[in-house]
Image (tube, rainbow, N blue to C red):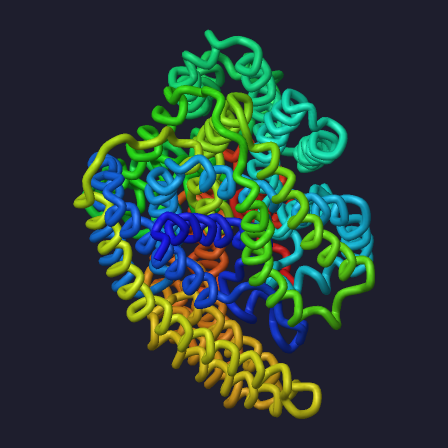
Amino acid sequence: MNLAAVSRSAAVLIAAIASARCLVVLLPETWFAFDPVLDPKPSVGLAPHWLMALDALLLVAASVGLVCEGVLRRGGSRLSMILWVIPVPLCLQWAFVGGHHGQVVLPWMAGVTAAMALAHLCRDPHTRRLVVAILIAVAAPIALQALTQWGWDNPDTAAWFIGHRDEALALMGLEPGSSAAMVYERRLLEGTPSGWFTSANLLATVMAACAIVFAGLTFAAQRQSRTAWVGGPLFVACLVSAGVVGLSGSLAGLVLLIAGVVIAACGFRYKAIRVWGGWIAIMMIAMAAIAPVAAAGLEAMGGDQAAGIPGARSMLIRWQYDIGAARLVAEAPLEGVGPAGFQDAYASVRVPGAPEEITSPHSMMLGWMSTIGVAGLSWVLLVLVLMWRAGTSRFEEDDPPSVALGFVAPIGAVLAILPSAMVTCQEWGDLDEASQLVRVFGWALMLPLAWLAWRAMQGMAVKWAVFVAAAVLITQAQVEMSLESSATVVWVLAMLGAAAAPIAGRGRAIPLGGGMLSGVLAIIVVAYIVLPWWKQDQLIERAAQALVYAPGDASGLEGAVVRGKASALLNDAWIVQHDPRVLVYAAEQQLAAAADAASRPEISVLHLGAAAKAGGVAMDSGSIAGGRLAIVALAAKSDVGNDREALLAAMTLAERVAAADPNAAMSWVTIARLADRLGDQAGASAAWKRAIESDNANTLDPAQRLPKSIRDEAIVVIEGRGQPPQRQ
């Protein structure tokens, strides 16, 4: 057996999996992003258990590759292995807790493992070329998707939304006039593309790195006198990738692209620049990390200093994130708040005026430390060590690519396409001809692009460009969630691993130990994470199908029965993983069932009670959203059944929600309205004052302020002008 070939194949598989994650929608849930009754077509994407299976396969590939390195006696980095291993036990502990901790932490483990493994496997220059070629080939389909969104999809969606605003917000479960609805509307009407990612910033992160590498490949092709048939297409790929960054509207992405191109160009020309590569990378990372602090300092000096600086507002918001995350680190330094626990934990510590309920602090160090404790600092150090090694390597010329390996890069691209093709097959009938063409043409372009990149992957310029691209990615991770988002973390860290300098040494103990540990992790992941999630996903899908294929129009008493059955299946799904989000879906279905059964108050009350119970259990499991739904259910139960006890229970729960999210204006609006219904005018007035104070503190994002109608309602009570206006 050719162990070197097996090791190379493992590295190619890691790169293919990292790329595949960028080409599909990664669904946080299978069906319930929208109400299946109102929108019977499910969200199409990669379900959680399939994503986890890919991560398990990546761990297997890393295991095989490292074992081969050990048998070949190529040695390994003891420091990299130690830094990789330290947080793993705590990560597994959180995954075993249940909820969706495993869903969040597994991509982190896969990404860090990919970085560490590729830092060893890419010592072979041919393997390194193949890995980088496969990673950047994703630029073709992503760019086509982004251009299609910018030119056609987003304008058409915005036009439809303007004509069907209330219907669209109802599908999203958003209340017209609420801050969430206003933010959603603003982002939709801006029309910036996002590819298959969850935000335009993540799209800009990936495409900026690809543009920088394509620039290096173009320079290398020109030096190799292959300008026409190799350099030309690569130059076009560079321009298109850079153009997509501009269309994304991401200021940070554009700034880092320009900085990266300038640094790359200077390094191509001057060896003295390349000598300082490690320090340049560390300086870029440090500057990004302190940017929110600098913005806050300018704001503290008078406010006007920061007002005219582009991106200052964004950095001020990230300063709020940093403060909240630092408080969480101080509260739980050893174990953290859990990989999936940041959003609800952040609500309790966010500063007054912080408008957003974020799922991560948009910071590599604070993100990992706040969620998995100080052990997360080990992964931060691993990233910095690999970045330093990449910047201090010798960017010398090397041998040309092996002709015999020319077919491997396109094969790796095909492997990266497979998950995307599998998902697209499910939605093929719902795509128009243009969208179908975009998918197929994008996939087809990946193959020649990977081959062209591999063919030009020679010389100092390419090595320097890959290093600069990795530096840009890690720099962006200090102010964006690219190392915390499941869509990008593996791709970013795989690029970093490929950029790291070759690890010298002999021996077999270190890579063999790392390979065996990675194999054990793969087994644990499949047995204790992938399989339970597969079972949960099946139950969620059954619940959705019960609604989609319900007889009749699934309304009235018949609809209430169907929704009740769906809610029961969702409760069964919750038992599998104890994911509070599933209970939130169950509560939503019970609330909808209560509305369907409005003609039979005694039945409606039963559904409202079930909704309150599901939401209350979700609240006990750490979900503030569940508590808010339970309050709605209890208040409605009081209306339907004239039940004062239900209203008192709603007030008790509202006070718990306000304690968990004290700086959210809507927490106090809810208390004020309940107090008014209970006849406590003094309590209502005090709560309205607190709501207005919290709302006034939000000076950074006026779009997320309370609607005028709610503020008018507050003023009526505070100023003692009688009863507030009746809400519809």
Residue 588, compared with residue 593, is above or below; it is above
Relative placement, left or right, of 656 versus 471 is left
Q: How many marks?
A: 0
Q: Residue at x 44, y 84 (%)?
A: 568
Q: Residue at x 51, y 66 (%)?
A: 47
Give the quadrant of the N terminus: bottom left
Q: Position of residue 311 (x, y in %)?
A: 58, 25
Q: Position of residue 428 (x, y in %)?
A: 72, 69
Q: Quadrant of residue 517?
A: bottom left
* Viewer-proximal residue among 80 and 680: 80
Q: Position of residue 7 (x, y in %)?
A: 37, 50
Q: Position of residue 248 (x, y in %)?
A: 67, 37
* Viewer-proximal residue among 544 and 423: 423
Relative placement, left or right, of 165 versus 379 is right
Give the quadrant of the C terminus: bottom right
Asked if residue 668 shows in the view, the reply is no
Q: Residue at x 63, y 40 (%)?
A: 703
Q: Quadrant of residue 583?
A: bottom left
* Viewer-proximal residue among 630 and 453: 453
Residue 592, compared with residue 469, is above or below; it is below
Asked if residue 205 shows in the view, the reply is yes
